[in-house]
Every structure is written in C-alpha cells, then in structure tokens.
C-alpha cells in the first residue's frame, strides 16, 4: 500500500503516524498496536516492556555526552476515539483511516483521524529510531485506554520507570505549555420516587428548554453558557411556588462532562392555574433571553399539552427533585491565583434521568486543588443529608498542581525562545490529563505537556496541522538536546 504522507517532513514522524492509522486502536482494542510497538522496539535492539494492561515502555540509552543526564519520560497514549458520520462505510476494527492532505492539514474522509494521540507516538518512535539526535536516557511510555478512563495511566507499574522528568505529548495547541490540570470526581445523586396515581382532573404539559450551546464542562465552563438542567430548576421552582403542580418525568443532558444543551420535564397542574402557568413561561423566555443574550442567545422555552401520564411523583418527590435542581453546585467556583484566566474549580450538573425507581442527578466536579474539590463534595454531602436522598462519588482522578520551581518548564521555555525568538504561553487545562495520574502512581515528577495544533478532535472533522507538527517535533528535539 502506498504511503499518502510520504512526502511530508519530518519523514519518519509522518511515516510512523501513517502506519498507526492502519492499525485498529480504538479504546479497549489496543492489542494489535501494542504488539506493533513491541516489535518496533525489538527490531532496533531497544529494551521494551509490555505491561499486563498492554502499556508499552521502550528504553533508549543517552547518546554520547548524555550518558549521565537525567532520564526523561516521553509519554503519549496509543488509543483513539472512533467516531464517523452515519453515512460513512468504515470499520474501525479493520479498515485503515482514510487520510487526506488538505493544504496544511491532514484530514480524513468522514472519520476521526487519531492524531489524538497517534502523533505523540509517532514523534517518540522517530526519536527512538534516530541515530543523529542528541538526547538523555529515554523511557518512552505509551499508555492504553486514555480516552475512556485513563486505564493505562492508572495501571502503570512504578517499578518499570526511573525517570523523574516527564514530557507529555497530548496537548493540541502549539506554543502553549500545559503545566497543571484539574482532578475530578463524579457525584451521582439518586432520589427514590414515591409514585402516585395520576389525577384525571389535572392538565399535563411537557416543558422543553433547548437550543443551548453546551460544550465541554472543563474547557467551556468559564464561557458563561447556560446549563439547561439548572434553567429547568429555576423555571420549575417558580411554577411550584405559585401553583398546584406535580412532576411525572424529568430529564436533561447527554454526557456528564458536557454542559447540557437541553432539558425536559412533564408536569401535571391544576387547570385553574393555566393562565398563571402560561404567564410564567413567557416571563422566563424573556428572563433567559436577557440573561444569556451574549453567551447563549438561542435558548428556547417550549410547552406542549400532552396526554395525562398514568402516574406522577408525589408532592414530596416533586419538591425534592426541584430543590436538587436548584441547589446542586454548578458552574465556576474559583479561579487560579497562579495562572491568569484559569478556572481552578467547577462543577457541572451534566445529566438528569428518570426511570421507574429513581430520578438520578449526575454532576462532574473538577479542581486543580484537591482540598477545594473536597469542599465541593462536602457541599453535596450536606445537601443530600438535608433532603434525605442518596449520593455516591465515583470515577475519581487526581489533579496535577502547578510547580513554581519546574526545571523541565524552564528548559522548554528556553528552547522555545531560542527557536522562535518569542515566549511560549504557560497555561493549564481545566480537565484531566494523564499527568495527574502519573504523579499519583510514580511519585514526584517534574512534568510538562505540549503538542502540535489540532482541530475538532474526537469528531469526523479532526485535523492535524502539518507545519505545526514539524515545528513541534523540532522543538522536542531541541528540548532533549538541552537536558544534560
């Protein structure tokens, strides 16, 4: 098979990247790509460890003059998100990614590209395969299943790694060095439903709040966008305080780590209050439109008369459901004092669902300072204790706190300034990175995260900048040369 990227520079980087696009590597399906990396190392006489979870660690001694330099861990993940348009005929378990060169970008024909994080693996492979790059002793750590739970980072064996400097290559903006990330945990509150028979003399309506921007609950939480579940809580609370009302269904949002774009409730109300109901709905249309005229200008509130459901929540369940929507912590809680403009802690009431037994409220909590995260958790614990409902915290992952005395950051900044004559941006991300897990698993590490420009990752519009990849690889080579 001909190589589509054969004329791109750096040749080895793009050659290995293209080879990776021909190997199945969706999260949880990494055996073939893990074996490929082991074979690559053995063919070059490099020490390699394939961990039980399929992480691969490849070690290469320092070049001449660097034998006693500090060992550096180069790190990326081998798995990718497998998404495609519905009308695209592609099997991620066997078909190569259909690559396309479009100007300065590598794209696909309707599938995800896997540049997140295949380009990190390819750059590390190019360095491992080099005989003309000066570098300290290297430990290349390629993890599995990062996209669905950081499984590889969680299971890495500390005995297999000795380096205390780590360069994570899983960033998506050139010229921005990530120096911390948030840790997080999910709160799952369950409200048991006390059902009562529906009242035939009551009128049923479905209320929809829709048209919101939504977005990533880490990256976009500071953009003042509306949360549809929280808006629904405000609307229902006003209705409930002004009329005889029962809920019979409540749902909103799609993913716990996404700001919900829509919310829906079915209510039963005394027909005597219909005129008040309609006025309150109109009032809130104007209120939401005014409050979010800039951040979320397309909010819509719609009502529809529906057939009476066979049952409804009791008054007590209705009351508690609305209070939970109102009182579950949501949005930005604190900003970083170390990095200008960085959200330090937040929470997102991402998903609300109703089944035969419970209404469930799913909230994602994030913070780059663990004790602040604990404080948010304690607020939730106090709330559920007052209301007499259940809560479980799960899927926790550790933060990576900013290190004001980082040597690797100093080297990276000096290398960047030498190559480009300007300063890089030192920043952080209000989301999870494997770096947080590594600090937990491997002890104190001096870490930084960098990478080339990518667009629309995790979507069929994913694109990787060719020129940015070249510059980022050259920067990585310069950084390694300056670690002595």
Image (cartoon, rainbow, N blue to C red):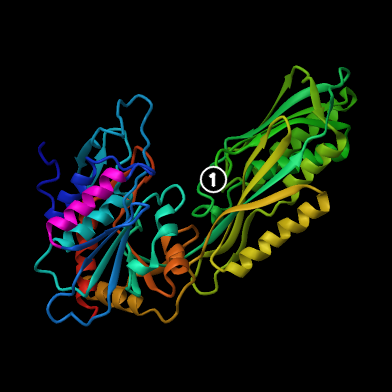
Residue 432 vertical position relative to residue 32 in the rendered view, above or below: below
Q: Position of residue 459 (x, y in %)?
A: 38, 40
In the image, is residue 231 part of the stretch drawn in magenta?
no
What secondary structure do most residues of the magenta stretch adopt? helix
> Is residue 2 in view from this perspective?
yes
Q: Position of residue 394 (x, y in %)?
A: 60, 52
Q: Quadrant of the C terminus?
A: bottom left
Name the residue at 14% across, 75% down. 63
Most foreground residue, 483 or 452: 483
The answer to whether residue 328 is left or right of residue 413 is: right
Task: Specify the segment rendered in magenta.
Answer: 31-45
Q: Position of residue 328 (x, y in %)?
A: 71, 51
The answer to whether residue 350 is left or right of residue 240 is: left
> Which residue was labeled with disc 1?
258
Name the residue at 51% across, 52% down. 220
Most foreground residue, 135 or 282: 135
Q: Position of residue 70 (x, y in %)?
A: 27, 79
């Amino acid at each position: 098979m001909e190589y589509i990227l054969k004329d791109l520079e750096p040749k080895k980087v793009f050659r290995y990247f293209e080879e990776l696009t021909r190997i199945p590597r969706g999260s949880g399906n990494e055996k073939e790509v893990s074996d490929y990396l082991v074979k690559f190392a053995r063919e070059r006489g490099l020490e390699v460890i394939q961990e039980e979870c399929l992480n691969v660690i490849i070690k290469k001694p320092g070049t001449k003059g660097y034998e006693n330099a500090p060992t550096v861990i180069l790190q990326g993940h081998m798995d990718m998100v497998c998404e495609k348009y519905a009308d695209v005929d592609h099997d991620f378990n066997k078909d190569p990614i259909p690559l396309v060169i479009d100007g300065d970008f590598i794209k696909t024909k309707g599938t995800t590209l896997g540049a997140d994080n295949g380009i990190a693996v390819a750059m590390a492979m190019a360095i491992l395969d080099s005989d003309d790059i000066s570098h300290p002793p290297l430990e290349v750590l390629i993890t599995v299943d990062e996209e669905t739970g950081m499984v590889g980072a969680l299971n890495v064996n500390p005995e297999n790694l000795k380096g205390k400097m780590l360069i994570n290559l899983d960033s998506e903006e050139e010229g921005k060095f990530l120096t911390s990330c948030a840790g997080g945990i999910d709160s799952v509150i369950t409200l048991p439903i006390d059902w009562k028979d529906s009242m035939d003399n009551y009128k049923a309506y479905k209320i929809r709040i829709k048209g919101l921007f939504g977005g990533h609950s880490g990256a976009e939480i500071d953009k003042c966008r509306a949360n549809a579940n929280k808006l629904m809580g405000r609307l229902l609370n006003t209705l409930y305080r002004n009329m005889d009302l029962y809920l019979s269904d409540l749902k909103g949002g799609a993913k716990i780590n996404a700001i919900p774009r829509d919310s829906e409730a079915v209510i039963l109300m005394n027909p005597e209050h219909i005129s008040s109901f309609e006025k309150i709905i109109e009032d809130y249309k104007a209120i939401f439109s005014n409050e979010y005229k800039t951040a979320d200008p397309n909010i819509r509130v719609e009502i529809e008369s529906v057939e009476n459901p066979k049952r409804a929540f009791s008054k007590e369940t209705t009351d508690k459901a609305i209070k939970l929507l109102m009182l579950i912590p949501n949005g930005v809680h604190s900003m970083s004092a170390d990095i200008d403009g960085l959200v330090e802690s937040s929470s997102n009431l991402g998903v609300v669902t109703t089944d035969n037994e419970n209404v469930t409220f799913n909230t994602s909590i994030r913070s780059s300072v663990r004790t602040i995260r604990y404080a948010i958790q304690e607020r939730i614990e106090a709330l559920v204790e007052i209301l007499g409902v259940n809560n479980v915290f799960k899927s926790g992952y550790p933060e990576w706190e900013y290190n004001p005395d980082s040597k690797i950051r100093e080297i990276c900044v000096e290398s960047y300034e030498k190559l480009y004559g300007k300063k890089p941006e030192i920043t952080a991300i209000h989301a999870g990175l494997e770096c947080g897990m590594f600090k937990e698993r491997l002890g104190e590490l001096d870490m930084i995260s960098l990478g080339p420009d990518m667009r629309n990752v995790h979507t069929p519009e994913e694109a990787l900048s060719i020129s940015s990849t070249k510059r980022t690889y050259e920067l990585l080579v310069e950084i390694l040369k300056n670690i002595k």
